[in-house]
Image: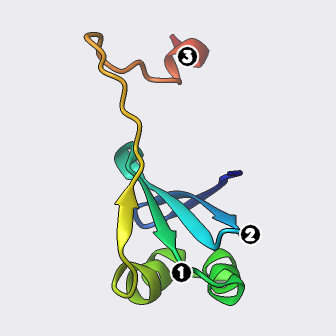
Amino acid sequence: MEMTPIHSGKLRAVGYDARNRILQVQLEGGVMLQYSGIGDELWRRLRDSASAWSFYRDNIEEEFSARNVSAQAPSSEPRKNPLDDLFG
């Protein structure tokens, strides 16, 4: 599923599978959640909202059940800051 970066509240990316009516959201910290039964209109309203975080909280998080699909690989090394390569 193609994810669109978004920075609103704790939202970091959103994606939608119209065929299967699945909304996927990535929250800060890397948590990835999927919501089933999301219609095209609700997806468009979230995507186009001036305040996506508030819209998500009021219309999706409170109304639909989420499935956590985060893939967190175990790592013994601390997370590398991606800016280190630029400003190292």
* Amino acid type assigned to the residue bearing label 2 in the image: Arg
Q: Secondary structure at mark 2?
A: loop
* Amino acid type assigned to the residue bearing label 3 in the image: Phe
Is 61 rendered above or below residue 13?
Answer: below
Is 2 rendered above or below residue 85?
Answer: below
| Residue with the mark numbered 2 | 19
| Residue with the mark numbered 1 | 51
Q: Which mark is residue 20?
A: none
From mark 1 to mark 3, how far is it between C-alphas?
A: 32 Å
Q: Which mark is residue 87?
A: 3
- Callout 1 crowding tier (Cα within 10 Å): few <14, some 14–19, many ≥20: few
Q: How many labels sit on residues?
A: 3
Q: Position of residue 63 (x, y in %)?
A: 38, 88
- The answer to which of marks 1 and 3 sits earlier in the sequence is 1
For residue 48, what is the image quadrant?
Answer: bottom right
- The answer to which of marks 1 and 2 sits earlier in the sequence is 2
